[in-house]
Image: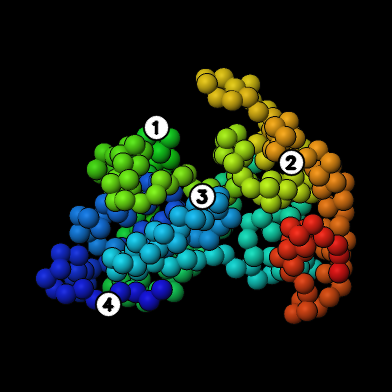
Amino acid sequence: MTARPCLANDDPRAPAQEAAPVIVAWGAGVDSTAMIIEMDARGERIDMVLRARMPERPETEAFIPIFEAWMYDRGIPHETVCYTPKRFKHWPPYSDLLENCLTNGTLPSIAFGRGVCSSKWKVGPQDAWTKAWPPAQRAWARGQKVVRLIGYDCSVRDSQRYAHRQGQISDLFEYRYPLREWGWSREDCELRIAKAGLPRVVASSCWFCTGMTCNEVRMLPRAHLRLIVLMEARAKPRLRTCEGLWRSSTKGLRGQEARPGSMTRFIREQGLLPPREIDRIIAQAPTELLDFLEGAAAVPLHQRPTMRNWLDRFNAGIATPD
C-alpha cells in the first residue's frame, strides 16, 4: 500500500525531519500484533510495518487481511515482501518454501535443527526491501541506523531468543524490543489484542513447521494434510538424521502429547486422511513429481511450467506430468 502522508507537526507521532525511520517486523502472530496495537495507542512512531509472505496456517491467513484493514484505518503503512528466487538451473520456477522443498526433495531446515529457512524467507526479503526504501537510504546517508522493532515478550522462550540476539551489532539497524521494555508477557499481548476488539491470534508459523503441535495438525484442512504427506514422501530417500517434519518421536513427558517424528505417521494413526489416500500419495506422487521435474529440465526457462502448475493439479487430484 502507499505510505500515509507526513503527519502534522503537532501530532505526537510526527517524526522530526532528521529522525531515523522506524520499521516493525510483523510476523502476524500474537506478540508483534500486540506490539503494533499498543504502539499506536501510545502515539509512538511507526514508519513502516513489514511482513514476509509465508505458507501460513489457515487461521493466520484469515487474520492477516483483518489486521491490515485495522492498520489502514489508522494510517499505519504496511507492505508484504517475499523472497524471489532468480536462479533455477534446470528446475521449474518455484515461489515459496513449500515449492522449494518439493523441488529439492528435502524438508525445511528447522526439521534438521537449523533455522536457515527464517533467515532466507523472512529476514532476507525484509532487509532487501528496506535497502531499497528511500527513507532508509536517506538515514544511512546521514550516518543513522534504521530502528527495527522486534516483538519478543518476557516469556521464558522469548527471553532465550532475546538473550541470543542481545548485543547484536549491525551497521544498518538498531534493534528495539518494546514488549520487553514494557514488561509484557504472552498473556498481556493476548489481552491487548482482545481489548482492541480483534479476533484471537494464533502463533504464526508455516503449517508444516516442526513447531506445529498435535492439535494444530489435527485442525489443518485436508489439502494441507495431503501436502504434508507428499513433502515427507518426496524427502524420505534423503532423510538420515530425522524421521520427518517433527524430527524424532517424543514420549509426551511434562504434559506434552506423545507423537512420532513423522507427521505422515501421525496423520495415519489419527485417521486424519483415509489410509488408501495416504498410500496412493506415497506410492505415486513423488514419482509423478520427478517425471515433471525431468520434463521441465528440457524446456527453456521462459517456457518452463512452474511448481505451482504441478501443485494445482496435485491439489485437484490429477497431478500428472506435462
**Residue identifier under label 4:** 5
The Cα–Cα distance between marks 4 and 3, rounded to whole angstroms, is: 32 Å
**Residue identifier under label 3:** 59
**Residue identifier under label 2:** 273
Of circles 4 and 2, the one toward us is: 2
Question: How many residues crowd around disc 2 within 10 Å: few (fewer than 14), some, or many (20 or more)?
Answer: some
Q: Secondary structure at mark 3?
A: helix
Query: Residue extending furthest left?
Result: 10
Q: Amino acid at mark 2?
A: Leu
Which of disc 1 and disc 3 is earlier in sequence? 3
Residue 141 position by quadrant: bottom left
Which residue is painted at 62% across and 38% down in the image? 218
Which residue is painted at 60% across and 68% down in the image? 84
The Cα–Cα distance between marks 4 and 2, rounded to whole angstroms, is: 51 Å
Which of disc 2 and disc 4 is earlier in sequence? 4
Q: Quadrant of the N terminus?
A: bottom left
Figure check: 42 above or below 82: above
Q: Amino acid at mark 1?
A: Val
Which of disc 3 and disc 4 is earlier in sequence? 4
- Compared across the picture, whether 25 is left or right of 278 comes to left
Q: Specify how the rendered protein is coloured.
A: rainbow
Name the spot of residue 130 as percent of width and height, x first.
42, 68
Q: Secondary structure at mark 1?
A: helix
**Residue identifier under label 1:** 156
Of circles 2 and 1, the one toward us is: 2
The answer to whether the residues at label 4 and label 1 have Cβ atoms under 8 Å apart is no
